[in-house]
Image: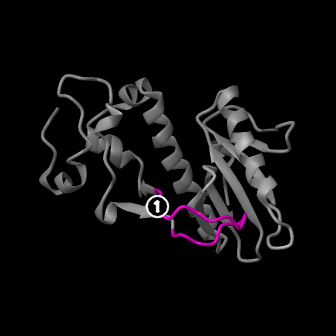
Amino acid sequence: MADRPKHLEPHATRLRRPRNSRTIHLDRVGQPSGRHHTSFRRRPSPAGADADDAPKRHLADPSLAAAALGVNSEAVLAELAYAGQIFEALAVRDLRVYAQAAQGDLFHYRDSDGLEVDAIVRLPDGRWLAVEVELGGRAAVDNAVKSLRRLADKIDPANTQPPSRLAVLTASGYGFEHPEGVSVVPITVLGP
């Protein structure tokens, strides 16, 4: 692996893999720093629960993480947990672009009960959408649906309107309505 350019060094010092390894060691991945990340600002959560203060961070472009590690697509796909993190960052980036085009905001949800939802898109008129991001697979989609249903069940209609839609965003496949009333859609159908 070639030496990293000096301008990447402050941001990539903890994003390393062994020289002769084709796999990524997740324990070596640190928090991004500086201007190369975005953080979700803490706002009152749609469910009205006390949210965790820790921001969730994503690189502005998910390919920066792979480039900083010096890995190719085969190495990323060999580590499904890491591939899932890269896919989530890509999906959140796309959701943020579409939310901003509609003058909306995008947030991450985490509460004191351990419930976490990858993205909440809130539009100016008060409508909102909750999204879980998964690479795919029935078990992962079913778990994401359970998380979204837990969030919807926490809504106090006296304080907050219910979500306009609950959705699981997947990497591929076809879209369908889950029996629990959650839309399962591939990222390829996103658009303004």
Q: Give residue 78's position: percent from left, percent from top.
A: 41, 23
Prevailing secondary structure class for the magenta stretch in the rendered image: loop
* Image quadrant where one finds the C terminus: bottom right
Q: Is residue 155 above or below residue 151?
A: below
Q: Nearest the camera: 54 or 70?
A: 54
Residue that sits furthest to the front in the current view: 113
Q: Is residue 38 above or below residue 86?
A: below
Q: Quadrant of residue 44?
A: bottom right
Q: Give residue 66's position: percent from left, percent from top.
A: 34, 40
Q: Is residue 12 above or below residue 140?
A: below
Residue at (24% x, 54% y) in the render: 11
Q: Give residue 49's position: percent from left, percent from top.
A: 68, 64
Please give the count of numbered marks on the rendered protein.
1
* Image quadrant where one finds the N terminus: top left
Residue 6 is left or right of residue 142, and the answer is left
Q: Give residue 147's position: percent from left, percent from top.
A: 70, 45
Residue 71 is left or right of residue 54, and the answer is left
Q: Nearest the camera: 40 or 103?
A: 40
Residue at (76% x, 74% y) in the render: 126
Residue at (55% x, 54% y) in the render: 92
Residue hosting label 1: 54
Asked if residue 16 lies in the magenta stretch, the reply is: no
Asked if residue 54 lies in the magenta stretch, the reply is: yes
Magenta-colored span:
41-56
Q: Quadrant of residue 82?
A: top left
**Amino acid, disc 1:** Ala
Secondary-structure class at tag 1: loop
